[in-house]
Image (tube, grey):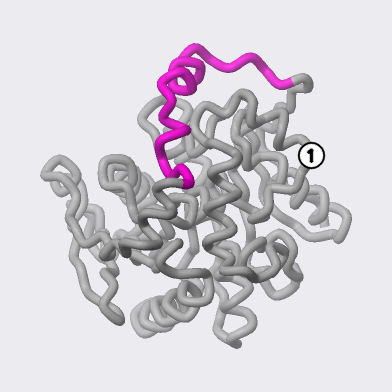
Amino acid sequence: MAINEFKIRVARPIRKPHVTQRLLRASGVRNRLFPAAKLEHWAANPRPPYCGLPSKLVLKKVDVTRTDLNGRPVYQVTPRHIGPDELGGHVLYLHGGAYVLDLLPHFHWPAIARLALTLRRSLTVPIYPIAPEHTYRQVFPFLLQVYRRMLDTWEPDSIAFMGDSAGGGMAFALCHAVRDAGLPQPTDALLLSPWMHLGLPAPEVLTVAKIDPFLNLDDLRAAGLRYAGGDPLDHPLLSPSMGPLDGLPRLTVFTGTHDVLNPDARAFRNRAIAEGHDIGWHELEGGMHTWMLLPGQKARVTLGQIRQVLSG
């Protein structure tokens, strides 16, 4: 089967970063998100799970309710002013955060609201265990429980998995876990700037790391090791791009060439081509990490593409 490609524009050498990306990189934010000192502090001082609510502005657009599962919050997000019969389906959304950060309220809630409104779908947003307090070994039993509970309400052919960054890799890995548990797959897994291989082994990573305005390569790798808990980094639940590709839902990848996670996403694409598997591939030349979750025209175009995928 052929790869489905959409607006692929690949530039080599890498395109010069936009002024906004240069300013973001100069701000130093990429070195403050989860440096080694923070990981050590969190390991010694475990954090409680995030349990807040979005801002009043977000709540004007979506209704948000919270339930708990094994002491962890699970949020249900529904677009306001859209009746239940008008919804196009449901999404299990896994937030990013390098496996060491909970949902980022000022970033993720507005993005989740835009997704709900654009896609005309309700979303389940679980607050899954994070490292260094936990490893992936606690994550997937929890997510499988979340999914089983979803299946009590929604048919699998109305469900899609979606996630950004680490959550994108986790959404892909959850497809492996669902298959191995003998559960029905969702229709789709949409992977937004996904972390495909925990070890970031693609040689081009070092080149992209020099211009990525948002992610620090060394800090990513350190966070990944905490999440792995000493297990091999090529385990399919850690590096889903390394797992068998049979028995999975339709996969669609959105990635930008100024994202340090892009080279391993491209390596997965090449593997899928070689093995004859059909995936969707959207690559934005000059696109930074998780651009589709930010306000702006490029994000609106990408959200429209996501809606088109789910409508197909």
Quadrant location, the C terminus: bottom right
Which stretch is magenta? Answer: 14-36
Camera-side residue of 294 and 84: 294
The answer to whether 110 is drawn above or below residue 87 in the figure is above
Answer whether residue 87 is visible to the viewer in this image.
Answer: yes
Q: Quadrant of residue 124?
A: bottom left
Camera-side residue of 7 and 253: 253
Residue at (60%, 87%) from the top-left corner? Answer: 182
The location of residue 171, given as percent across then percent down, is 53, 62
Residue at (59%, 58%) from the top-left corner? Answer: 225
Camera-side residue of 209 and 276: 209
The location of residue 39, given as percent across then percent down, is 43, 53
Q: Amino acid at mark 1?
A: Pro
Residue at the spot of label 1: 203
The answer to whether 20 is drawn above or below residue 223 in the figure is above
The location of residue 294, given as percent across then percent down, is 39, 33
